[in-house]
Amino acid sequence: MTATAVRRAVAQAPATDLQLAAHRARIRRMVWIRLGQFFVALFVIGGWQWFTAAGWVDKFFFGQPTGIWNSLVHLFTVGTAFGSIWENLWVTVQEALLGFLLGTSAGVVVGILLGSNRYLASVFGPYIKIVNSVPRIVLGSIFIVAFGLGVFPKVLLAAVLVFFVVFFNAFQGVREVDQNLVANVRVLGASPLQVARHVTIPSAMTWIIASLHTAFGFAIIGALVAEVLGATHGIGLIISQAQGSFDPDTVFACMVITSVFTLLAEYLITLLERSILRWRPPNRSESQAI
Amino acid sequence: MVETSTPHVAKPGAEDEARINIVGLTKRYLTPKGEVFTAIRDVTLTVEPGQFCAIVGPTGCGKSTTLAQVSGLEQPSSGSVSVGNQIVDGITRGVSYMFQADALFPWKSVLGNVMIGPLLLGTPKAEATGLAKDWLRRVGLAGFEDRFPHQLSGGMRKRVAMAAALINNPRILLMDEPFGALDVQTKAIMQTELLQLWEELRPSVLFITHDLDEAVALSDRVVIMTSSPGSVKDIFDIDLPRPRGDVQHIRHEQRFLELQGQIWESLKDEVTRAYERSAAVAA
Ligand SMILES: Nc1ncnc2c1ncn2[C@@H]1O[C@H](COP(=O)(O)OP(=O)(O)OP(=O)(O)O)[C@@H](O)[C@H]1O
Ligand SMILES: [Mg+2]
């Protein structure tokens, strides 16, 4: 080894050491996080199991983790009184997704329209506030009376719940548009439609996409509640039947199933968010990484 | 499209199209309290075709307001602006505007920001892309096409804005303190670049600045505005030879210093008056 090579190796050593140390620290941190997460789950589920097994908490009312597991196995192997679990899940998923799509598109369109037109906003503003203050879950009963036990009333209730969340965000998003950018694109000769396409919509997109996370939760709630109110298929129906026969384990099992589905949808929305809001400085999306 | 693809100077009579004629321009705003506030009063000013005209004046005197009326984004309360021989009553084609605030689209890449001009004029996408790439090269940003504005430095963002303003080959270029927020070195470089591009395209320029050196170094003519409500106080013709070359060098010439001194004499009173007035309001 020549003298220069040695010197270079010495000079490089601290850098690689530093990188290695940083890597090790990162792995150690990750292990601790996972361990912590595991113990939280163990504590909650284990405690639940223990308390119900010991009889301090009545499993007849509050269920029991092993009971929920058995119930899940039963649901997936034997099925339900209304067909297989997959069939029922598909009905609920379909209702939630359709409601989500319908509510989101209506919310975006109406939000952008009212957001960019002061006259329309003044005319419809008070009515939207009134409708928003109505407990909308109650609308589910009306929809079921009006449209029967099929899929449609569930889609409608989910859509109504989703609509207001998305609408208010889209509306606010349009109001927050940087007027400098609007002026800029107008000077370049943009028509009102082009202003919307190049400035208003992309700018409001930050708000709209942020609302989609909440909105999807509402879509699921809408579908489930409408099913509980009256249905021939669906997770909500299974829940209401289980409630009728004092079977909390099945209620919890259904909760687990819908949660898994919601997490999946949440993940897809996050992917969508990442690809559409690619232009944003990273620190903001990092702070949302939770 | 003839207008944007060939230099205007080449067409007979096209020169007039680049003349800005401001006559008795007054703009009043309604303040939130409901009072009438006169931002500019009776501004009269002509910018000859291909002329580089700087506007200086104390802060709040209505420089940006004047530019907004010329661009057609706002309507004058009285008086008129005409570009070419046409009264401005709305957005006018062939006018580019570099705003005082950063006005790049954060959701568009650098390329997207520059090519939106031609796209909105109906240029096919492939052609617009080629044009935008060429312009990015001219402002020294080749290789940065895919970046987003937040990934650029302040100086680079100004270059993008400059390319976006020039890509449509405007006959009128409105610039509102374009280099105000830059450090001294970057500013000098950008000024030299702007002069070069201006020599090539020869639009008529209205250039707002607070920097007297900048005003004298770049312009054919410097307009001094009075304190609020603004009107034209003085007009200085800058007879430094063109092309001016590197703005760093002209700063030391005798004639430059003379002119700069005269302009400062004229501006000084206005700045003091504006300052005293705002101090009185604050007291
Ligand atoms: N939309 C508006 N409504 C009410 N007042 C306004 C409006 N726009 C501008 N003004 C007022 O008009 C005056 C001139 O504003 P303007 O922005 O033209 O100043 P300026 O000369 O560009 O100042 P600066 O050099 O600080 O940019 C200011 O007092 C400002 O408060
Ligand atoms: Mg200004």
Image (spheres, rainbow, N blue to C red):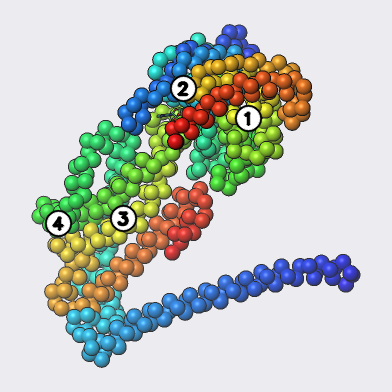
**Which residue was labeled with disc 1?**
B211
Near mark 1 (Cα within 10 A), the count class, few <14, some 14-19 or many ≥20, is few
Residue B13 vertical position relative to residue B151 in the rendered view, above or below: above
User: Of the residues shown, which amino acid type is indicated by label 1?
Assistant: Asp
- Circles 2 and 3: CB atoms closer than 8 Å: no
Discs 2 and 1 share one subunit: yes
Name which quarter of the figure residue A6 lies in: bottom right
Residue placed under numbered mark 4 in the picture? A138
Label 2 crowd bin: few (<14), some (14–19), many (20+), radius 10 Å: some
- Chain letter of disc 1? B
Mark 3 is surrounded, within 10 Å at the Cα level, by few (under 14), some (14 to 19) or many (20 or more) other residues, namely: many
Asked whether the viewer can see residue B256, the reply is: yes
Residue at the spot 38% in from the left edge and 32% down from the top edge: A193
**x 38%, y 30%: residue:** A192
Residue behind mark 2: B229
CA distance separating discs 1 and 3: 52 Å
Chain on which label 4 sits: A
Viewer-nearest of discs 1 and 3 = 1
Of the two numbered discs 4 and 1 in the rendering, the one whose residue sits closer to the viewer: 1
Residue A146 in percent (x, y) is at 11, 52
- Pointers 4 and 1 in contact (C-beta within 8 Å): no
Question: The C terminus of chain B appears in which quarter of the rendering?
Answer: top left
Label 3 to label 4: alpha-carbon separation: 18 Å
User: Compared with residue A256, is residue A225 higher up or lower down, i.e. above or below?
Assistant: above
Residue A215 marker:
3
Question: Given the image, on which type of amino acid does mark 3 rest?
Answer: Ala
